[in-house]
Amino acid sequence: LYMPSRDFSRLKGFPMKDLPYTEWARHYYDEFISIYDPNKDQPAFICVPPGMPVSMAMAAPFPLEVIQRPNDITMFFEAYFQYRKIYLEGYQRPDPVLPTNMGYSVGHWEGDTLVVETTNLAERTQGTTIISDEARIEERMKLEIDDKGNKNLVDKITLIDPKAYTQNIDMTGIWNWSPDTPILEYVCTNEIYQEYLERVKPERLKEKMKLKEEQEEKK
């Protein structure tokens, strides 16, 4: 069991601004921010499971359980009750592989480092974290001992998505060993987010109009 690190000098999540969007992704980004506030209205803020790669580089205080077996590694996240499976090389690939938020992950060991490639990610176009159906993710996971003698799972993550971004996005997830932390129930649905968007839409449009008027007055 692990808890997300609060060491923000090393932890690097998915960027919230100044992302190198392509024209395809920029369309969805502009559509979202034309109405909504990215600091308040992101899908993950209001119950939508973020999936990969965000789930591995988050700072929210929800534990992660890792179960390692000879042919696969299972990860269970309390946050959003997400489930992830990493198949180790040699495991028979299912056919077909359906796109999901967590994708399909295959890993192999390079010494004490687990190298993972994730493909078959579901397309996500709401909010500012845009993922296309062409995305793939590369990870290098390793257990490290910090200066205080604590065991940490360090995950160096690279999102490669040329359809959505003009350059790769790098992240670092850090999980602190926490064997006595229980995993509790977490209830969340996409419908809650859609209802939220409809509820706040009039308020957000008023905010946008007021901001526009203030900017016009300053000219």
Image: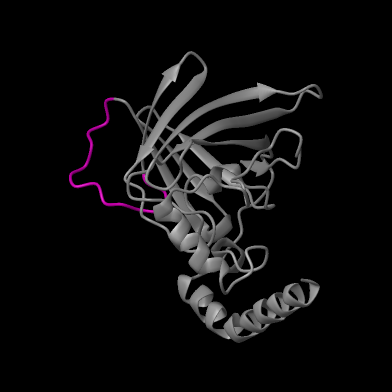
Q: Quadrant of the N terminus?
A: top right
Locate residue 183, reporting x and y percent. Answer: 61, 53
Indicate the quadrant where residue 120 lies: top left
At 54% across and 48% down in the image, what residue appears? Answer: 55
Magenta span includes 96: yes
Outermost front residue: 219
The secondary structure making up most of the magenta span is loop
Q: Nearer the viewer, residue 59 or 22?
A: 22
**Looking at the image, is 73 positioned above or below residue 216?**
above
Locate residue 36, reporting x and y percent. Answer: 59, 72
- 34 displayed left or right of 138: right
Magenta span includes 183: no
At 47% across and 70% down in the image, what residue appears? Answer: 190
Indicate the quadrant where residue 144 lies: top right
Q: Nearer the viewer, residue 21 or 145?
A: 21
At 64% across and 79% down in the image, what residue appears? Answer: 204
Locate residue 127, reporting x and y percent. Answer: 53, 62
Q: Quadrant of the C terminus?
A: bottom right
Locate residue 108, reporting x and y percent. Answer: 39, 23
Outermost top residue: 111
**Looking at the image, is 109 positioned above or below residue 181?**
above
Give the color scheme: rainbow, by chain, secondary structure or one colour. one colour
Magenta residues, as a range? 90-103
> How many numbered callouts?
0
